[in-house]
Image (cartoon, helix red, strand yellow):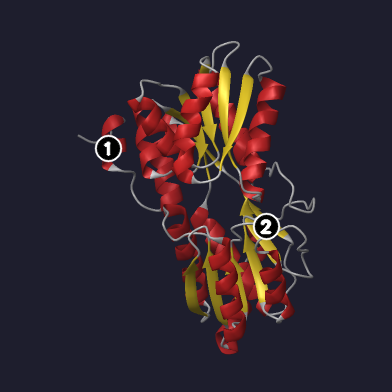
Amino acid sequence: MTIAGLGPHGERAAPPERVSLLPEDIAAAKTATLRVAIVLHTLDSDWTRLQISGMLGIFGDCGVVVTEVVDCSFSADRQVAALDRLIAAAPDAIVALPVANEQVVAAFRRVSAAGIRLVLLENVPTGLLPGSHYTSLVSSDNFGLGKMAAAGLAPHLAEGAAVGVLGFAADFFATNEREIAFTNWMQANRPDVRTHVRRFGAIEEAADLALRMIADHPDISGFFAVWDTPANAVATRLESEGHAPAMATVDLGEDVAIALAAGRPFVSVAAQQPFQQGVAAARTTILALLGRTVPAWIAMPGVAVARSNVADSFQIIWRKPAPREVLRLLGLAP
């Protein structure tokens, strides 16, 4: 599948197949006694758990010891403290998802200055350069995910409809790309649709923000939120207040999958492939530690999910059966 976006420095994407491990790579890693730490924005999501699972499986197969998995709880201060502590522990590599840009960039510079290999997930703090400050970025095709969500929502919007776009207030590469791509797609393909953009600073703010948007623009009949956790909060709150807009988001969590199977409020989901992204991140890290050349940006294509393919998509992405309620709503289980 074609990758729609460009990397943070305008790079063309390399497919995950570019970082496959040969038998001799695995053998070399097993004899190298490598240590890796993982630093993530949160551990409290299905996306994160599947990323970790993908990484741990590959690292384990190659004899690479994961010394620590850090939960930063979306806190830049906590991430900076964790990185500084890990610099002192001197692992061979750190795989990290930066939670912010300006607040954490100096700490990430200290990691690379200490000679620790750095592989980033989803976001590159402004000023960091591949080959100088980090080895590679491994991410979803976030621009493609935004386009995918827009294309899925568009058929559910009447002529001249208004759509609320709920972006993330942080300067974060992944969510910025999704928001830009969604609005660009609508402007190019549904110029009759008016988009109203607001950005939440914390997940718990998203639902109140959506209600204020409806108060300001009562003709809003659809919403796009840049990932599923705030999108779920918005859907629940709007329903309790008597609103039923068609909704699109990124990531196929269980609640979103059930709503898709029910037919509302979610009608379109652009799903990431977190397990495969974790696999690619681990392979990239191992190859870099073995002195192999790796691409500056490796991107995973998204999966377009609607009611018609939600059960099999959930099984492919999450590597477990779709929730019982999804199967029941689709008539696939009693």
Q: Secondary structure at mark 2?
A: loop
In the picture, measured across the screen, residue 264 lies left or right of residue 133, that is: left
Q: Who's the residue at 47% across and 45% down the image?
A: 203
In the picture, measured across the screen, residue 40 lies left or right of residue 136, that is: left
* Residue 107 pos. (x, y %): 67, 70
Q: Quadrant of residue 148?
A: top right
Furthest residue toward top = 159
Q: Nearer the viewer, residue 188 or 57?
A: 188
* Residue 102 pos. (x, y %): 70, 59
Please state which amino acid type lies under the numbered disc 1.
Glu
* Residue 218 pos. (x, y %): 51, 15
The crowding category of the residue bearing disc 1, from other C-alpha atoms within 10 Å (few below 14, some 14 to 19, many at least 20), is: some
Q: Secondary structure at mark 1?
A: helix
* Residue 123 pos. (x, y %): 65, 56
Can residue 138 be seen from the camera position used here? yes
User: Please, is residue 129 above or below residue 34 in the view?
Assistant: above
Q: Who's the residue at 54% across and 63% down the image?
A: 279
Q: Quadrant of residue 153?
A: top right
Q: Quadrant of residue 192?
A: top right
- Numbered badge on residue 101: 2
Please state which amino acid type lies under the numbered disc 2.
Asn
In the picture, measured across the screen, residue 149 lies left or right of residue 321, that is: right
| N-term mark: 1 or 2 | 2
Q: Which residue is mark 1?
A: 325
Q: Nearer the viewer, residue 127 or 141?
A: 127
In the picture, the quarter occupied by the N terminus is top right
